[in-house]
Amino acid sequence: PRPARRSLLTFFKVVSGKFNMMGWWLVLVFAGPASALSAERVSRRSLLAGAVVPQVAMAVSGGGKDFAGSTIKGEDFSNKVYTNKDFSGVDAAGTNFASSKLQGTRFFKADLEGADFSKADLTAASLEGANLKEVTLTDAIAEGAAFSQTLEDVRDIQGADFTDAIIQTYVQRNLCARPDAKGVNPKT
């Protein structure tokens, strides 16, 4: 079996050219513990070759498009158009999206803690699994948007339009019981 392991290792070297540390670990998993290369030697070689560990979660989810996986903490994205953009897994704590057009935008598992979406158009946006703690949705349009239970963690929903939004039934009941669940959206 030893020649097969070496040929597998050679195959990976040829296919990928320069390995990064994650690539070497994948080879070690496939090649098994009897591989001719020790984990220590592989790590040392990878580091010396200027290895960069990939963002595995983004590779698995198919992300990497637009802003996915980026850190945009506290930045100003207000009054701009980001229709159908991907912000999946983004670290956007405290970011300002006020009055932006975010139709069809994807915020899957994004950290949006303290972000401001006041008067933003989130029509058909996806915010499933996103951290919405202390997020402001005052006068936001979220028609047909998809949310998870984290919608209960938002700071303010006054005047927000959730027409046809995908929200779990128990979350809907809890939102309707909030004191800020009032007002009429000025645009819709």
Image: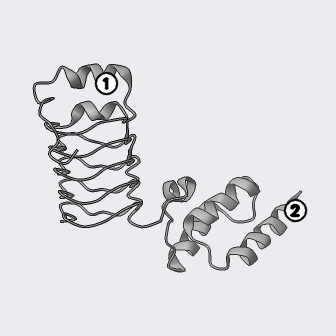
Labels in figure, total: 2
**Left or right for 79, reference 104:** left
Name the image colouring: one colour
Taking the spot 42% from the left edge, 60% from the top edge, the residue there is 84
Of 185 and 93, nearer the camera is 185
Q: Residue furthest front?
A: 188
Residue 56 is marked as: none
Q: Is residue 180 left or right of residue 160?
A: left
Q: Which residue is mark 2?
A: 4
- The Cα atoms of the two marked residues, 1 and 2, are separated by 55 Å
Residue occupying image coordinates x 56% and y 66%: 21
Residue visible at 20% across and 51% down? 117
Q: Amino acid at mark 2?
A: Ala
At horizontal 34% and vertical 48% (from top left) the residue drawn is: 123
In the image, 70 versus 158, the foreground residue is: 158
Residue type highlighted by circle 1? Val
Q: Nearer the viewer, mark 1 or mark 2?
A: 1
As rendered, which of 30 and 67 lies closer to the eye? 67
Residue 112, image x, y percentages: 26, 49
Q: Which residue is mark 1?
A: 171
Q: Secondary structure at mark 1?
A: helix
Q: Where is 109 relative to 154, above or below?
A: below
In the image shown, does 149 or 85 lie closer to the viewer? 85
Mark 1 nearby-residue class (10 Å; few <14, some 14–19, many ≥20): some
As drawn, 42 above or below 14: above
From the top left corner, tell me how far across and down residue 95 is, in percent: 20, 58
Q: Secondary structure at mark 2?
A: helix
Mark 2 Cα-neighbour bin, 10 Å: few <14, some 14–19, many ≥20: few
129 on left or right of 140 = right
The N terminus, quarter of image: bottom right
Q: Position of residue 71 (x, y in %)?
A: 30, 63
Residue 90, position in %: x, y?
Answer: 35, 57
